[in-house]
Image: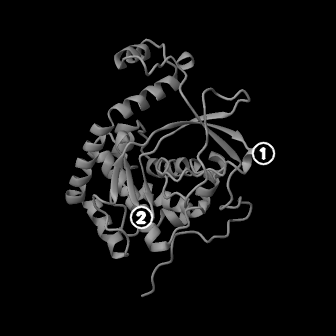
Amino acid sequence: MSTPPSPLPADAPAAGSAPTGAPSDRVQHFLENDPKRTGFDPATRWWVNYFRILSGQVTPEGVHHYREWRYRQNEARDCRRCEEARDYLLKYSPIVRFMVERTAQLGGHQFDARTIVCARCPGRIVVENKATPDTKADNLTNTGQPIPGDGSPSPPPPPPPMSVDKPPADGGTLRVVRQGGGFHPHFGILLCANEMRDRKHLEDSLAHELVHAYDHLRWRVDWDNLRHAACSEIRASMLSGECRYTREALTRGNWSLTQQFQRCVRLRAIQSLTARPRCKDDVHATKVVNEVWDSCFSDTRPFDDIYK
């Protein structure tokens, strides 16, 4: 019996699509904290800043910087909890053990405590502007770090975006970039210890990255090709359990009874694709996800059906 074809789309984009391997024209800067602007002062005791937040004296940007400051202080504790949960899941989680076995059968990493690493993943407030001819060449930015829910980064990148201490005067777009984990073809899986709420959350994140690993080993995914990346993101969100009804309803407050699973998978794939430097914006990401949706959403390998 012949092997079913890969769900990954052909390299050639559909008519009217932007080239999938070309970098976008976004210029990215990281917005640093300014206590005078945000109301958050890292030189002050944590409970004073917390009271300022409760009393409305800290801006939303300041709340983000406060959260990152606390993550840095609690890094050792968070990593220890993450490693304990990881070790438990490698022994007792059905979906994690199944995916580890399937990736091993394909000749990839032996995923264990050496290749599944817990670490603090800093969130960033990214300032985006359109590139100019003078800046475009220096801002083909792929930081080499996995971005929220995204998959594998490209090979060694150019220098990361520079930091700025205030929003741009020309009205650049501000957005918060966070991540739960990542997969790298050569190094293994990263779990962001500071973003893990509990063991079930970590199980979903680990299963998500193991689907990326499976796709890479089975079909040699070109992670710079947005159509390939979109397909793997669809499959990872669909198969990992992160879009199951209980997670959507109880954690994210999405109570729709029809098509909520599909909406969740599509939204998370779009969000992950938007965070990639080669994606222009969410409109571009939506278009790419829609182009590959039918073939990728219908493929549940290595499962017979959606597991959870």
Q: Quadrant of the C terminus?
A: bottom left
Q: Is residue 241 above or below residue 107?
A: above
Q: Is residue 80 above or below residue 42?
A: below
Q: Residues within 10 Å of mark 2 (few under 14, many from 20)?
A: many
Give the amino acid type for the residue marked by disc 2 in the picture. Answer: Ala
Q: Nearer the viewer, residue 283 or 178?
A: 178
Looking at the rendered image, the disc whose residue lies closer to the viewer, 2 or 1, is: 1
Which of disc 1 and disc 2 is earlier in sequence?
Answer: 1
Q: Which residue is mark 2?
A: 213
In the image, residue 266 lies at what x, y percent?
52, 51
The residue furthest right is: 133
The residue furthest bottom is: 1
Q: Report how far apart the C-alphas of labels 2 and 1 lie in the structure.
A: 38 Å
Q: Nearer the viewer, residue 263 or 73?
A: 73
Q: Which mark is residue 235?
A: none
Q: Residues within 10 Å of mark 1 (few under 14, many from 20)?
A: few
Give the amino acid type for the residue marked by disc 1 in the picture. Answer: Asp
Quick check: 132 left or right of 168? right
In the image, residue 210 lies at what x, y percent?
38, 61
- Please, which colouring scheme is shown? one colour
> Residue 239: which quarter of the image?
bottom left
Q: Nearer the viewer, residue 268 or 135?
A: 135
Q: Which mark is residue 134?
A: 1
Q: Nearer the viewer, residue 25 or 134?
A: 134
Residue shown at 56% from the left, 52% from the top? 273
Quick check: 264 left or right of 292? left
> Number of labelled discs?
2
> Residue 208: which quarter of the image?
bottom left
Dot 1: what SS? helix
Residue shown at 25% from the left, 43% from the top? 80
Dot 2: what SS? helix
